[in-house]
Each structure stands twice: as C-alpha cells, then as structure tokens.
Amino acid sequence: MSEQFISANHAAATAAAMAGEANREARGFGGGVYPITPQTECIELLCKTEITKGHLVRVESEHSAMAVCIGTSFAGARSFTASSSNGLAYMAENVYAAAFARLPIVMMAVNRTLGPPWNIWVDHGDTLMLRDSGWVQMYCEDNQEVLDSILFAFRLAEDARVLLPVMVCQDAFVLSHTMMQTDVPTQEQVDRYLPELDLPHRVADRPVTVGGLDFPHETEQHRKQHHEAMGRVFDVYKDAQSEFEAVFGRKIPDPIESYQADDAELILVSMGTTASTTRGVVDELRASGIAAGSVRLRLFRPFPEALLREALKNATKVGFVDRDMSPGMGGVLWSEGRNAAPRDAVVKNYMIGLGGGDIRPGHIEALFRELMEATESGPPEVQSRVVEVGG
C-alpha cells in the first residue's frame, strides 16, 4: 500500500483500473466512457491505464456509454463508467436497463447541478432523480472513501445474493478536483478482495435472447426479485465490510454514521461532504453546552430507515439537510427520512448549497440554532425551506 496525493476523480479511476485488473484471469474488464465536467479527469486517467485484459470504448454519448457497459457485463466482464448531471439524465434509459437486467456495473457519479441554466457545481439532484432506477447508491465524504467505495461496490454488486449495479457518488469539485493524501492498495490486495466475476446469466456459447418482451406476471416476478435483492444488500454490505477491513486494514463506513448522536437533543441529518462540516460544528456546540449531534447517510439505496430510526431515537429536534430539491415536495432526504424521526420530535428540512453554494460552518451553526428555537414541525408544506448561502 502506498500513500498518494490525488484527487477523488483519480482515486476512482485508480480503484476501477485495479478492480479491472483483478478480473484478468476471468472475462476481463471494460465499459463505455464519455466526458462531462466534472468527472472527465476520471475517465481520462482510466483510458491511459494499461489493463491486461479488456478495454474501454470511447463513445459519442452517455447513453451509449452505459450501453457498452451493459454489453460488457452481459459478456461476463467487470464493467465501469462515470458520469454526471445532464449526462446521467441522457443515460437514464440505459441506467434502468442495466438494473432490470441485474448487471453488476459500477458507476462513479460526480454530483453536479442539472441545467439549464448551466451550472457545473455540486447538487445531489442528478443522482437522486435515479433513486428509483434499481441501483444501489452510496454517497462519499472524502477521497479515501471514494477509492475504497469503488472497490467495495464491485464486491457488493457481484455478490450472487445481490447482482445489482452500484452508483458511487461524490460531490463535484469539493471532492472531484480536491487533492488529499490517499492510501492506494497493492494489486495483490485488490486481487484478494475481489474474486473473479462469474456472472450466472452471462451470454455464452449457447444462443440466448436478452431484453425480450415480458408479460405482466413475468414483470411482477422480476420486480419482486429485484426488490428482494435490494433487501439483501444490508447483510451483504456487512460481509463485504468485514472482508474489506481484513484485507486493507481499514473499515468501510457503516450505511449510517452517527456522531455524538446518542444523547443529542438536536440532530442534523446530511449526506456527502456536508457531514464533515456538521461534525466540526457539533464539537463547537458541545463545548458550549448544547447537546448537538450529526447523522450521515452513506447508503441511500436501499434506504436504511431502520438504522436511521435507531440513530435518531433520542432526539427531540431533527433537521434534514438536503443539497437537492424536489419541487413541490422539498428535499429528497427529508421526504424519505422524516418518518424515521421520533413521533413527537420537531422535524425541519433545510435545502442548502443548491447549485453548489459553499456550505460553511457558520451556516450549519445557524441551522442548529434555528432548530433549537423551533417549537413545532408545522405541516409538511412549511417544514421545508431553501437556505441561501450564495457563493
């Protein structure tokens, strides 16, 4: 293992290349790639990296990029791509197709605001619009977690109990272009962690038809199987987590990460890099005698409602911090997570940093203090508000 000063984009590319190399004695590695800011650095580095067996296809669109991944995966090879924002929107048809075909593709998604008007900065709305697509979704906090999560994603996706694609999400520019010291494993370690892929429904010598017509009952069965596979993710997550620590000597974060939450009266729930800012503010508030806490969702699909409910069980006031908006509803994290708060708790939703505004400690402290002063949740239509931060 070596320590390298790299961006999260390069961390993802490094991990994807090593995962591909680990399948060299089986069906190899491949995928389709197309550039879009701010993930382009990732695929540029990946395209320059030599892999013993397989190759990447430079295509004309994101839709085609996922199509190549689908073909690569059906052939039984390990498959990867990366995209962002409007690229994910253009790719959407095949994003669904990959999941419905139960293909263990891994994609790095750099969260960027959807346009127009065009905006290249962070917003979680692009991946959250795909929350019903049947992909596992993980949201990362730092560069090391991005690298580790790509390796972890292949292990999770390819498990026979799951066989679902995985989206590893990271905040645009806050992580994608930020350099930090990152532990890069050896190829031998990655080989030990990732068994050769043996996709049970891969296309082989015997002709088969894929993507044909389903009648209603067949579709019911497929959706039932898909839903059950999502339910098994939590157990497989634990197994892959334990194996990761045994091989690499560090732990993959839990689906829910609590910080000072056990005795907290006020808790802010967030995803991505916002959580690290929140933890720092929690420390400052604790020093002044305020019982504040933080909860981070790392795993958004499948949604860890039971784990979230346990993390929030002692809170009297809960704020959901969304870096996204579902117009007419509010924040997506709030809309899905609010029922996990204690029944008598005050619950609020803060949509902040939309379009990439810099979420600073002062903003988080202001949210805690506003939450502290709140005496009731109010009806759902007034629980949510946009917090302007500029930047």
Image (cartoon, rainbow, N blue to C red):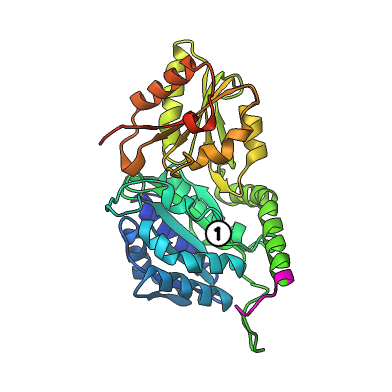
> Which amino acid, by three-letter code, is at mark 1?
Ser
Left or right, 133 with reference to 234: left
In the image, residue 182 above or below residue 225 = above
Quadrant for the C terminus, please. top left
Q: Can I make out residue 367 in this image?
A: yes
Left or right relative to 3: residue 137: right
Please check the rendered image and state whether residue 323 is part of the magenta-colored stretch, yes or no. no
| Quarter occupied by residue 63 | bottom left
Query: Where does the image place residue 341, in percent across and percent down from the top left?
Result: 61, 29
- Rendering quarter of residue 355: top left
Rendered residue at 56%/35% (across/down): 257
- Decide which of 313, 82 is in the foreground and name it: 313
Q: For the image shown, how many numbered marks are present on the structure? A: 1
* Residue matched to label 1: 133
Front residue (pair 168, 270): 270
Secondary-structure class at tag 1: loop
Residue at the image position 43 percent from the left and 44 percent from the top: 327
Residue 216 in magenta stretch: yes
Is the residue 271 above or below the residue 369 in the image?
Answer: below
At which x and y percent is residue 310?
A: 66, 31
Residue furthest to the left: 391
Confirm whether residue 2 shows in the render. no
85 sits left or right of 220 in the view? left
Q: x, y percentage for residue 72?
A: 51, 76
In the image, residue 175 sits, relative to residue 368, either above or below, namely below
User: Could you say where residue 215 lies in the image, as x and y percent from the top left?
Assistant: 70, 75
Give the residue at x 49% y 33%.
381
Q: What segment is highlighted magenta in the picture? A: 211-217
The image quarter in which residue 77 lies? bottom right
Residue 74 vs residue 187: left or right? right
* Magenta-drawn stretch, dominant element (helix, strand or loop): loop
Pointer 1 local density, CA inside 10 Å: few below 14, some 14–19, many at least 20: many
